[in-house]
Structures are given as C-alpha cells and as structure tokens.
Image: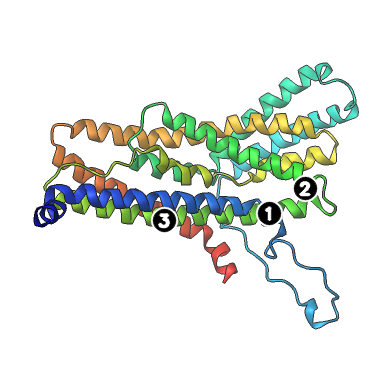
Amino acid sequence: METGSQYLLSPGNTYYLVEEGLMNVKRHFIIFVIMTAMTVSFASANPLITAPRTDSGGESGKQEKQINPVRITGGSYSLFQKQGDLRNKLADVFSLLSDNSKAPIQSHIQLILVVTLISFLYGILHAAGPGHRKTVVFSLYLTRKAPVWEPAIIALLLALLHGGAAIVIMLVFSGVAGSVTANTDSLSIVMEGLSYIILIVTAVFLIIHESITYSISVRNHSAQSADSGHATGLLPFIVSGIYPCPGAILIMVLCFTMHVLRFGIISVLAMSFGMSIPIMAAAYLAWSGRTGLFKMLKHNERAAAKAAFIIEIGGYVFLLLFSLYISWPFLTSLV
C-alpha cells in the first residue's frame, strides 16, 4: 500500500496523472462546445431573436430588449467600393438569369461561369476586409504545431461553413412568413455572437490548460512542451465558424427576390472558395513564423519548450482580448 502511494506521488508520474485529468476536462469541454453549437439550431425560437407580438397599448406591449451585433472594425473605402462594383455586376447577371429562370440550367452555362468567376473574386475582396476569422486562424497557427497542409484545409473549411451557414439560413427562412431580411439578420447577429462566446471560453480554457501542463513539465525537469497539435483542439475553432457571412446573405436575399435561388447557392459556394484565400494567407503567415522559429531552436529542447509556452500563451491571450473586444457590444446587450 505504501509502495503504491509512493508510486502515484512520485515526480516522474505526476505529469502523466495530471495530464490524464486534463484530457478528461478537455473531453468535457468539447462536449460543451458541441452542445453550445446545437443551441444555434433553436435560435429562431429564442425570445432574444423574435419579440412576441403584443398590443402596443398594454403594459405587455413594452419593446423587447434589442440584441446588439458584434463590433464591426474599419476597412479600406476603396476595398468596399470594389466589392460594391462586383456586387452590382452580380446583380446584373442574376437579372439576366431571372428573365429566363424556367429554362434548364444547362442553357445558362456561360452566365453561370461568369457568376462563379465574379463571386470568387468578390469572396477574395470580401475576406480581405475586416473579420472572416483571419485573426482567429493567425492566433491558432501561431500556437499550434501542424502539418503543412492543415492550414489550407482549415481555412477552406471555415470559409465553406461561413458561406454554407448563409445558404442554410436562407433556405430555412425562404419558406417562413414575414420579412426574410429581418429574420436572417436577427439570427445572424445571435449566431455570430455565440461564435465569439465559444472563442472566449476556448481561449480561457487553453490558457489554463497550457499553463498547468507547462508548470508540471518544469517541475518534473522535463523539456516537454504542451502539445497543441491534437486534432480535437481544432473543434471549437471550426464550430466558431458556423455563422452566416453578411456578404453571402446579401447575395442570397438578392437571388431570393429575383427567384433565382439555385444560382445564388452556386454564387455563395464560389464566393466561399474565394474567401478561403485571405484566410489561408493569415494561417500560413503564422504557421511559417512558428515553424521557422522552432527550426532555429531545434538543438535546444528546453529553450524550444519555453518559447513554445510563451508563444502559445501569448496567442491565446491575444485571441481572448480580440474576441472580447469584437463581441463586447453583443455581450453587454445580453446583461
């Protein structure tokens, strides 16, 4: 009995025992993220989105508290102007498609190719502006050890989720009575706010997790650094991308009013591929910097472990502060 106790409390086993406990906490955290994401599907019935209809004269006719959108950071005026020009060109092509919308899709091949090209270029310019998870993927790959192909896949997946959410929401609300624009805008505000709450919780969790792991490795005189390369660590970041892109919503609403929704879906998918380009650029900028640094430190494991910890904590703190700054108007409106 005494031998067993000494074994459990020996410094050589402390790291693995606590790490096993941290993995259990991480599994529970992943479940929490999944459950949070599932609540988004019920958001259309949330009183935060849809105010109940009441008579304006009674006490119950008080206006429902408004939920503010997340903060919108500034951007280049010339970039916004170029995006507007491309949207106008898309509208012209959609108008041509609308004039003969009953014809088989094969007869619109040339116009579809034009829509695809313009949408792809629009997606690049749109994602080059504020938002679209560029800061998030930069923080992620500043802290994460990953193979060379992973940033490209994650950037593409986030862009497709961003555009795909707009398609799904539009298809849902296209069959609901009332203003499509108002419904999609309300749900978009809540979904984007929830996505930043997931990022905030994730950043706090990772700061605590990596701090504990590193302190244990130092106490045990080990050069092992926190391994942030687990595939499960990507799940909160991927889930946080499931909110509709405002630019994609504009395209889908335009196509809905022109009765060419199927061409709007093609446009948004092409736009998503375009949006992935600036996101990939941000991801690979961080990935290459991190990879280059650790190649320089590969002969000094202890220095590499210390540098990894500093970079990881710095990246997660930056992600936390950025997410709080962007989501602050949304968070305060919930109080």
The reply to whether the C-beta atoms of the residues labelled 3 and 2 are less than 8 Å apart is no
Say which amino acid is labelled 2: Phe
Name the secondary structure under disc 3: helix
Q: Residue at x 20, y 54 (%)?
A: 215
- The front one of 113 and 43 is 43
Residue 68, picture quadrant: bottom right
Q: Which numbered tag is attached to residue 187?
A: 1
Earlier residue among tags 1 and 3: 1
Residue furthest front in the image: 1
Q: Picture coordinates of residue 273 (x, y %)? A: 59, 29
Q: Residue at x 78, y 68 (%)?
A: 52
- Return the residue at label 2: 173
The reply to whether the C-beta atoms of the residues labelled 1 and 3 are less than 8 Å apart is no
Q: Picture coordinates of residue 78 (x, y %)? A: 60, 41
Picture quarter with the C terminus: bottom right
Say which amino acid is labelled 1: Leu
Relative to 163, is 199 on the left or the right?
left
Q: Which numbered tag is attached to residue 320?
A: 3
Earlier residue among tags 1 and 2: 2
Q: Picture coordinates of residue 124 (x, y %)? A: 58, 33
Q: Which numbered tag is attached to residue 300?
A: none
Picture quarter with the N terminus: bottom left
The reply to whether the C-beta atoms of the residues labelled 1 and 2 are less than 8 Å apart is yes
Label 1 – label 2 distance at C-alpha: 10 Å
Relative to 260, is 86 on the left or the right?
left
Q: Picture coordinates of residue 298 (x, y %)? A: 18, 32
Say which amino acid is labelled 3: Leu
